[in-house]
Image (tube, rainbow, N blue to C red):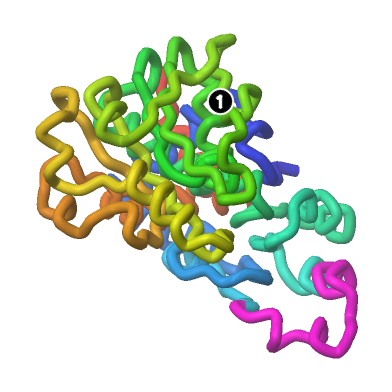
Amino acid sequence: MPDLISIEDLSRGDIEHIFSSIDHIRRSPDDFRRALAGKVVCMLFFEPSTRTRWSFEAAAHRLGAQVLSVPDARNTRLELGESLLDTTRMAGFYCDAVVARHADDRVMQRIKDTIRVPLINAGEGRTQHPTQTLIDLYTLREHFGGIDNLHIGIAGGIRYSRAAKSLIAGLRKFSNVRLHVVDAPHDADEGSAFPPALGELNGLAPLEYPSMKEMIGHVDMVYVVRVQQEKFTDPAAYARQLQKCRLHRGLLSRASAGLIVMHCLPRTDELDADVDETPQNKYFQQARHGVAVRSATLLRALGHRTANRLIGASRPC
């Protein structure tokens, strides 16, 4: 059963096949209007979401599926003491696929053990966000024509960000990618080293910089990650970490030729709105890719014959 719990569930070949599917969906959306007609997709979001939930729901509707949505756990019997796994078990009885989001680490495998339909992870704890990673990788591939040999910069609360950690895991599927980082530890972790295992790519440790200003000239893409203000107890520590990671238009003059800027959103002060109108901005394009990417993951999960035939027709030789 083609679940998607971690980006590590996918080989490079799997990712490239999904890319081909996304290309076809974007090129010929009418081919897929009824691809999942008669299917029911349940959205179990036990954590707030805007872009991820909307794009999954839009994808399901555009493929002809019906949607059962739980956008707020307060509207379930969890509030009266029902266990999470009893709730997810009911979803498995009533639908053909489950899309779930939860704040706890390693909860997806527990959910999977309660259902007999495909499960797609829409964000889990501080470690996994595979469909966001597919969006990120697809955006890189679309702009650069490929992902091999790129220099990727990530700046912000990397060690606490599931999007950043999932992206790093996805980059390990590709060749000769080098990671550059500006780390923003919470005040309790200030002074501690960036975790070496987190940033290792192809046997190489990441190149670490003291600020965005020093890193930006060395990378092809900079992925700006939120500096999680709510996790700081010391406002001065937050201000220090934000300042070294913040990207604004003035820094783009120091950028390498062809630099692009990405962000999984929502953003706060780490990415200035004055970058929005520059050619380096690719973060809104990332967001636009969400529906096509999540359409491809739903088609993969549900294994619909018509969808597979259409996707197979677009598979590269």
- Pick whichever, 185 or 249, lies toward us: 185
Q: Quadrant of residue 272?
A: bottom left
Identify the secondary structure beneath mark 1: helix
Picture coordinates of residue 22 (x, y %)?
A: 40, 42
Q: Is residue 20 visible?
A: no
| Image location (x, y in percent) of residue 39 | 62, 66
Q: Residue at x 72, y 53 (%)?
A: 118
Q: Label 1 is placed on what type of residue? A: Gly
User: Residue 109 or 61: which is nearer the viewer?
Assistant: 109
| Residue at x 44% of width, y 24% of height | 208
Tell me which residue sits at (66%, 40%) in the image.
6
Q: Quadrant of residue 221?
A: top left
Looking at the image, which is closer to me, 199 or 66?
Answer: 199
Closest to the observer, 188 or 80: 188
Q: Is residue 28 visible?
A: yes
Q: Which residues are magenta?
A: 71-89
The answer to if 81 sits in the magenta stretch is: yes
Q: Disc 1 designates what residue?
A: 199
